Image (cartoon, rainbow, N blue to C red):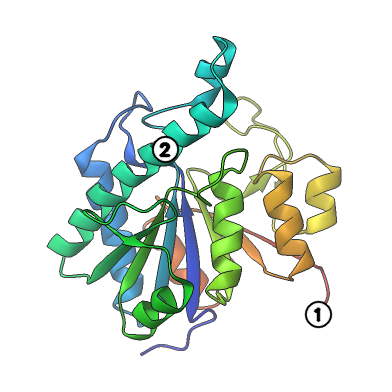
Amino acid sequence: MPNLRFGRILLKLSGEALAGPTGFGIDVSEVDAIANRVKAIYSMGVQVAIVIGAGNLWRGKQGLERGMDRATADYMGMLGTVMNTQVLMDALERMEVVTRVQTAIEMRAIAEPYIRRRAIRHLEKGRVVVFGAGTGNPYFSTDTAAALRAMEMDADVLIKATKVDGVYDSDPKTNPNAKRFDHLTYIEVLNKRLEVMDSTAISLCMENELPILVLNLWDEAGLINALRGKAVGTLIDNGLE
């Protein structure tokens, strides 16, 4: 087993990561690509927990714009995340990666209820754990759920998987002069209003000194290199050596 910079990680995936070019729905080829990335680090001996969003199936903002109750819109999003956990679990299991799904809202027919100690035990036994239904509460994003679960699992790092190679001061897709940051502090992210994760998630990580690594999951070697200690993406921490 190679020397690992991080032995236990929480991987935050957006729902859009599972979608095709349109950004909606589930593209099985994209799901398989993600499962392959997870399998690669699982095979290295990394303990992997995953939190996934639901933007590919439901975006609560659309409901709110039409007068939908906020809690109802959020609960619909939580149900969407559970659908995503199922397709990701299936892809991983087909690749012989032992996987367990736990949900913050009980759905015993398809997943275990979230129990912290059981989830930790799954990780210790070499199983990938996928968390669905966010925190189980409206008004909290899956970014915040990822920060919360990462701390509950005593993860070494929260890895935010994106389709760009780090954090920029503006959108690199529209601004060719956008500046990429190799390192940021939590305070800098909040003060600069950088759209990495929502402020609640950033603040939670800051208060508990949980580092955040933002990287491009679609860079085939990016995640592996990061876990081996190479400089990849943007690291967010308290700035202390």
Residues at discs 2 and 1 in contact (Cβ within 8 Å): no
Label 1 secondary element: loop
| Residue at x-position 47% and y-position 35% | 75
Mark 2 or 1: in front is 2
Inspect this view and state whether residue 12 appears: yes
Inspect this view and state whether residue 46 appears: no
Judge by depth and name the residue closer to the eye, 193 or 1: 193
Residue 7 vs 234, above or below: the answer is below
Spot occupied by residue 189 in the image (x, y as percentages of width and height): 78, 49
| Residue at x-position 39% and y-position 77% | 118
Spot occupied by residue 55 in the image (x, y as percentages of width and height): 44, 33
Compute the Cα span from label 2 to label 1: 36 Å
Label 2 secondary element: loop
Spot occupied by residue 167 in the image (x, y as percentages of width and height): 65, 47
For label 2, count other residues whose C-alpha is less than 10 Å away and answer few (under 14), some (14-19) or many (20+): many
Q: What is the quadrant of the C terminus in the image?
A: bottom right
For label 1, count other residues whose C-alpha is less than 10 Å away and answer few (under 14), some (14-19) or many (20+): few
| Residue at x-position 23% and y-position 54% | 110
Judge by depth and name the residue closer to the eye, 178 or 44: 44
Judge by depth and name the residue closer to the eye, 53 or 179: 53
Q: How many marks?
A: 2
Q: Which residue is mark 2?
A: 54
Q: Quick check: 132 left or right of 234?
A: left
Considering every residue shown, the one lying at the far top of the view is: 66
Q: Amino acid at mark 2?
A: Ala
Q: What is the quadrant of the N terminus in the image?
A: bottom left
| Residue at x-position 47% and y-position 89% | 3
Q: Amino acid at mark 1?
A: Glu
Q: Which residue is mark 1?
A: 241
Spot occupied by residue 21 in the image (x, y as percentages of width and height): 33, 27
